[in-house]
Image (cartoon, grey):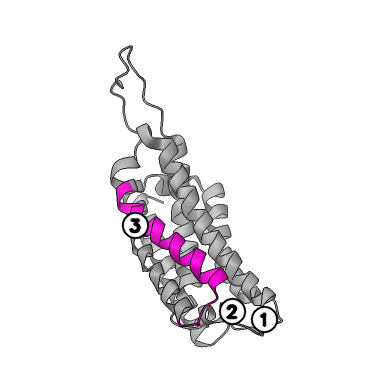
Amino acid sequence: MNNEKYRKLTSWLIAAWFVFALSASALHLFQTSPTAPPLAFGLSVLAPILVFLAWFRISPGFRAFVLGLNPRMLTLVHSWRVGGFVFLVLYTYGILPGMFALPAGWGDIAIGATAAFVATKLADRAHRTSFIVWQILGMFDLATAIAMGTLSRIISPNGVTAAPMTLLPLSLIPTFAVPLLFILHIICVAQARLWREPVHALGGEPLPSSAA
């Protein structure tokens, strides 16, 4: 299968994934009682990531396609995460708990505000370490948001919880956007690990070399 076929296939899979997340949310499949573990919700977050990792590992063609994507564009996608200020607004009005909304909101704003700089200035082998660190911070922000949202249900089941995140339109964030963005981070880290360090001349200037 060539890259164009992989591109079409992945586009269709992402579209189908979005429709599923939308339909499942409309049918309230992600809603659970405060005392029950959010299994369906957790699976909707983890399953796409696990499927991607398995496909990436077992399929050389898919792996080559993924590693050939433009890391600058993949990083620039995260710019929309400045919309995390919505979490802060919902916290202000008492709709979301602070233990979830504050780290999720400020974390998304920080990642979104720096995405364009990282995409244009750090997405190359000369800044490989900084690029990888930023990607890991982005993954940490997403993982923290999911963890804090889940814990809020356990710590304060009768108080303000992150339950609104299981309802449309907010439910599309954890069930579609979060795993998709996490996957983009994984791809960028995998790409950056293959970049070669620039070879320096005696005077300290990097010698020309082909990009990875």
Taking the image as shown, residue 159 lies to the left or right of residue 116, namely: right
Residue 157: numbered disc = 1
Residue 100, above or below 77: below
Q: Residue furthest front?
A: 92
Please name the residue shown 37% across and 35% down the image. Answer: 127
The residue pinned by badge 2 equals 161
Q: CA distance from mark 1 to mark 2?
A: 7 Å
Sooner in the amino-acid sequence: mark 3 or mark 2:
3
Looking at the picture, how far across and down is residue 35, in whole percent? 71, 82
Taking the image as shown, residue 43 lies to the left or right of residue 201, namely: right
Task: Residue 103: say if magenta.
Answer: yes
The answer to the question of whether label 1 and label 2 lie on touching residues, with beta carbons closer than 8 A, is yes
Q: Is residue 186 visible?
A: no
Q: CA distance from mark 3 to mark 1?
A: 33 Å
Residue nearest the observer in this picture, 161 or 26:
161
Taking the image as shown, residue 5 lies to the left or right of residue 92, namely: left
- The quarter in which the C terminus is drawn is top left
Q: Mark 1 falls on what kind of element?
A: loop
Residue 113: numbered disc = 3
